Structures are given as C-alpha cells and as structure tokens.
Image: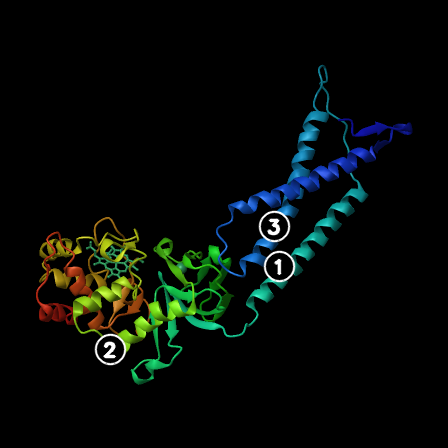
Amino acid sequence: MDLSSKSGGGRTGYNPVLIILGTVVVLVGGYLISLLSPSLFPLAASAEAGPIDQLFRVMLFLGGVVFVLVEGLIILSIVRFRARKGEAGDGANFNGNVTLEVIWTAIPAVVVVFITLYSYQVWVDIQAPKDDELVIETEGLRFVWSFSYTDPLNRLAEADTQNFTDSVLHTYVGRPVRLKMETRDVNHAFWVPTMRIKQDLLAGRQTEVAFTPTEAGRYRIVCTELCGGGHGAMYSYIQVYATEQEWMERFIDVRVERILNPPTDPLTVGFNLLNENAYPCSGCHVLESVNWAGVTGPTLNGIGDTAARRASANGLGGAEEYIAQAIRHPNAYIVPGYNSGVMPQFGAEQDEPDAVDGAYYVYMSDDSLTAIVTYLCLQTATGESACGDEAAIRAAVEAQ
Ligand code: HEC
Ligand SMILES: [Cu+2]
C-alpha cells in the first residue's frame, strides 16, 4: 500500500502505476453503483422513463465515482497515516496546493455544466409538443385531483354539457398525454413515480406536464407539496387501458351514455357515481362494496347504521339527514378521532369560492347527493335502508 516513494531532497513523488490502479477502481466502483442502484427504481410505465432513467444512471455514475474516491481516500488515510506504536506527537502539517485546488474546482465545474445541459435537454424533449396529444385539464384542490374530459366523438353537443370530470386519470397505451394543470387554492405537485413525471401546480398560473404511457395498469398519483392537513390523503390513480378502443368502451362511452340517458333510479345512480369515482371519496374512505381502500377518514362500511346512531345522538331527523350533512357540511359534525378541515365540502353551488365553512369546495348537485345518500343508507348490517323513502332523502338533501 505504499503510494509514495521518497526521492531526493525530501520531495514526495507518486507511483504512476498505483495512481492508474486507483483511477480504475474509482471508475469501476462508480459504474457498478450506476448499474446496481436502478434496480430500486419503480416500474417504468411511460416513454419518458427511458431518458429520465438514463439521466439518473449518469448521475449515479458521477456520484458513485465521488463516493468511491472520497471513501477510498478516507480508508487509505486511516490505514496509511495511523499512529504507530510509540508515536505520540502530531503528524506533519501540510497546507496549500494550487495544482490540487485548480483540479478540484475545474472538474466539478465541468461536471455540473454537463449535467445542467444534459438534464435541460431531457426536460425540453419531454415537454415538446407531440402529434395528436390528449389534452386533459387537471385541477388540484385541497385534497383532491380532478380531470376533465371531452368526448372525442362530440356526442355531448346535444346535452347541456361539453365535458365531464373524474377523480381518476383515464388514458391508454401509446397516446401522448398533456395535462394543463391549475390549482384552486394553494400550490400542489403532481407526481407519478411509474411515469417519471413530476410538476408543481402554482397558484395563479397554468403549468403543464406531458407523458406517453407504455404499460397498461393502474398507477398511483401523489401530491408532493405539503398543502395542508389532508396532504397525505391527496392521491389518486392513472388508469391506463391497453388500447384506445378499450378506453372508449370502458370509460368514455359509459360516461357519455350516462350523461345522454341518465338512469333515473337513485340507487343505481348513487352506485355508479361512487363505483366510478365521479367524486374523490375513495382516496379517504373504505367502502368494500365499491372497492375503496382510503384510510384518512372513517370507514363507510355500515355507514347506514352508524348514521342512524349519530343522527339520534345529535338530534338530527334521521340517517339521511346525517349523511347529507356529513357530505354538504363536513365540519358541522366531526367524527370523534378525526380532524375538521380535511374532508372537502361537496357544495350545491357550481362556482362557489374556496373555503366555505373552513373546508374546500367541490361541486355536487342535489340530484347526485340524493343518489349518493340513497346508496349509503343501504350500507347496513341487515341490508335494509336506514333512511326514509326517496322523498324523505331528497328533502334532507334540500334542507342542507
Ligand atoms: C380528503 C379526505 C376525504 C375525502 C376526499 C372525503 N372524505 Fe368523507 N371524511 C373524511 C374525514 C377526515 C372524515 C371525518 C371527519 C369529519 O367528520 O368531517 C369524513 C367523514 C365522512 C362521513 C361521516 C362518517 C361517519 O362515520 O360518521 C361521511 C358519510 C363521508 N365522510 C362521506 C364522504 C363521501 C361520500 C365522500 C366523497 C363524495 C367523501 N367523504 C370524501 C375525509 C374525506
Ligand atoms: Cu396537495
């Protein structure tokens, strides 16, 4: 391990063979780190994952080289310059080495400029407009995501509406997607690890993110900007269908049909709204009959029975009144053990400003609420509705 060989006059020269050997060890070490750590990356489900992961590998290589170099020199120094038996004094004192300082400034400067140019180019390529993009207006609000769709076949022209929203992002393999994102309240950040995309939503302006799914499946969307008490609950999913046809049949057609020929039976309507995540409840509540698994709020399994108990304990007319109030005015009664201000307010006015009674506002018509209450009233141990008849439920909704 003798790196230096004394030459005349007390100067210290270094053995070139050992320096070359050290360089090889450092480069191979960096390469191994860049080769092995990507096994920790999540599944890659978009076209953008290729260039992003490559950028990561390059940075892991550079970081790996620095890591092996620094750790190697520390270990070398511990061994080579340790205090030998009988040595009690301080070691020799060195300071100032212009050559070394120039090298350790110049190399990192070049590396940093290289990473800047390289990553900027990757970003520009990803954000560049592509042919035939599926543009989806995206809204973030405390603590939910909302995506807005138009019918590609323009069948909605005859109905009163142009588009419809969903709390899940539905798309399909191979179609470039561009999200135009706005926030209704504070800053949020849209992150989909499997798609390798991440973009802030900034108050007062529109931001965009683009990606092209390559693998069918259901992927998690996460908010990564601490946006308040329910931030941890602010997640949703991207549902990627295998083909455009499947996307049309299983999502667009179903929703368009429902707008054009709405079912009239409130129970069916309520089940459809909840089962298809027309509103963002599934991120926060468990309800087995529609496959919800959120744990931020109380479970809604058996909510008919719970509501009947809470209604009589709180002097409300009946279970229907309790459930309607819990959705229209979530802060009017707080379930013990939970915090106020977490559940958004599902209000009756379409363009209500934010922060009505301390919660955040999502529009829900009286018809939708009546249907949802009807469905939730049936979540009882016996399977019998805990509420009154249709007229009683509608009256409870309208009284809110
Ligand atoms: C961001 C999280 C979040 C979302 C989204 C959310 N909730 Fe809640 N919900 C809560 C929390 C937390 C509570 C308990 C605190 C309270 O009473 O407001 C709650 C309470 C309730 C209750 C009362 C439960 C009981 O045991 O008394 C009902 C009913 C309810 N939510 C229904 C819904 C429905 C329906 C939706 C969708 C339309 C929804 N929630 C969306 C978090 C959420
Ligand atoms: Cu958020």
Q: Is residue 50 left or right of residue 11?
A: left
Q: N-terminal of the two: label 1 or label 2?
A: 1
**Which residue, given by chain and number where applicable, does mark 2 sit on?**
261
Does mark 1's beta carbon lie closer than 8 Å to ligand 2?
Answer: no
Mark 3 or 1, closer to the camera: 3
Mark 1 or 2, closer to the camera: 2
Residue 17 % position (x, y): 81, 34
| Residue drawn at (74%, 39%) of the image | 23
Would you place residue 134 above or below residue 193 in this image? Answer: below
Q: Secondary structure at mark 3?
A: helix
| Residue drawn at (77%, 46%) of the image | 103
The amino acid marked with disc number 2 is: Asn
**Which residue, given by chain and number where applicable, does mark 1 sit on?**
119
Does mark 2's beta carbon lie closer than 8 Å to ligand 1?
Answer: no
Q: Is residue 13 left or right of residue 69?
A: right
**Which residue, given by chain and number where applicable, does mark 3 sit on?**
57
The amino acid marked with disc number 1 is: Ser
The amino acid marked with disc number 3 is: Arg
What is the C-alpha distance between the residues marked 1 and 2?
49 Å
